[in-house]
Amino acid sequence: VMASMVNVAIHASQFPETVRRDLTHSLRTRSINHKFHYDSIKQAQKWLALHRAYSPSQTDPDCAAIYEQSFQAAAAACANTTRIHLTGLGCGGGQKEARLLHLLRRPDRSVSYTPCDVSTALVLTAVQEASAILPPNACQPVVCDLATADDLPGELKQLVPTGSAHLITCFGMIPNFEPPTILPLLSGLLRRGDQLLLSGNLAPGADYNAGLARILPLYDNPMTRDWLLCFLLDLGVERTDGQLSFDIENCPTGSGLKRIAAYFQFTRACRIAIGDEHFEFRIGDSLRLFYSYRHTPDRILALLELHGVSIIQQWISRSEDEGVFLCGPAEGEPAKRGQSPHL
């Protein structure tokens, strides 16, 4: 049973003045920080419903199976550990982390957990998921913005109890970050002996462009549109002020990756007010609301190696649109290329 009171640590990246600054920056640059799609309880609930309806881990039994296999592999690697700490980066509702915690819990083992997300509502949902597995004092939830919290690796390491093995999860997060932002964070968190379970949305098939076109309906659908537009509607924009479209575009950093991006193009002039600041949008102006990179296993391997992270084992769904990767610091076991139950 979840405790009647939960202590939540709020990082400075989510203090009100910082959030306001990030919001005005997003509007000024016409590129919305993804965190603003999870800000309210209403947005979090819409995202959870969308995740249940469209996420392969929820809709595809084979995809769910590769997660279970990765959890078992991570738990097996910790078999001789009597103290273990799980850090869930971008934990969302925490369902996957809860399944992992269930495997890690043993009568002779101390297990602790830090669910970490930009949304207070989602962090509390993750705590609730874990409450049937761990005692309340074993959870230390953290609300932060992974994109801007430069000191986060050090802060999170301080929450790992002395003598504990450290297992980090980062499920479904790398598609929504520029590679130079998220990968140094993951590398900075890993110490010798730590493990990282990372999942990535993939472009299925041998033809990268054809794979992107194939998975486009996972984004261009009524539930995703409703979730993304929630942000604009809360700012006073009307649905009739423009049109939402989804495009496939190149990564601006020249990584060779491509992403699916959602743009709201104004068909009527519109003004958004944030306090005493005003943002004018003319007919034809576009506002990028969202993007999601689609990787391939080889691209993920290359990006991780550039940042000192090695893939130890990997699992790819039969549909090839999702992969889970068990990783460690580069000085540990080298990557085993192509290791997958379906390859």
Image (tube, rainbow, N blue to C red):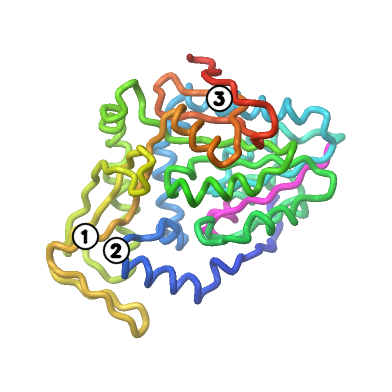
| Magenta residues (range) | 109-125
Whether the magenta-drawn stretch holds residue 67 is answered as no
- Residue 197 can be seen, yes or no: yes
Residue 286 is marked as 1
Compare residues 334 and 204 and report the one nearer the observer.
Answer: 334
Mark 3 secondary-structure assignment? strand
Sooner in the amino-acid sequence: mark 2 or mark 3? 2
**Residue at label 2?**
30
**Residue at the image point whose x is 39% and y is 22% from the top:** 319
- Judging depth in this view, the residue of 2 and 170 nearest the camera is 170
The answer to whether residue 5 is seen in the rendering is no
Q: Earlier in the sequence, mark 3 or mark 1?
A: 1
Residue type at tag 3 = Gln
Tag 3 residue: 314
Q: Can you say whether 274 is above or below 86 in the image?
A: below
Q: Amino acid at mark 1?
A: Ser
Residue 32 is situated, as x and y percent measured from the top left of the image, at 35, 60
Q: Determine which quarter of the picture holds residue 85.
A: top right
Q: Are marks 2 and 1 in contact (CB under 8 Å)?
A: yes
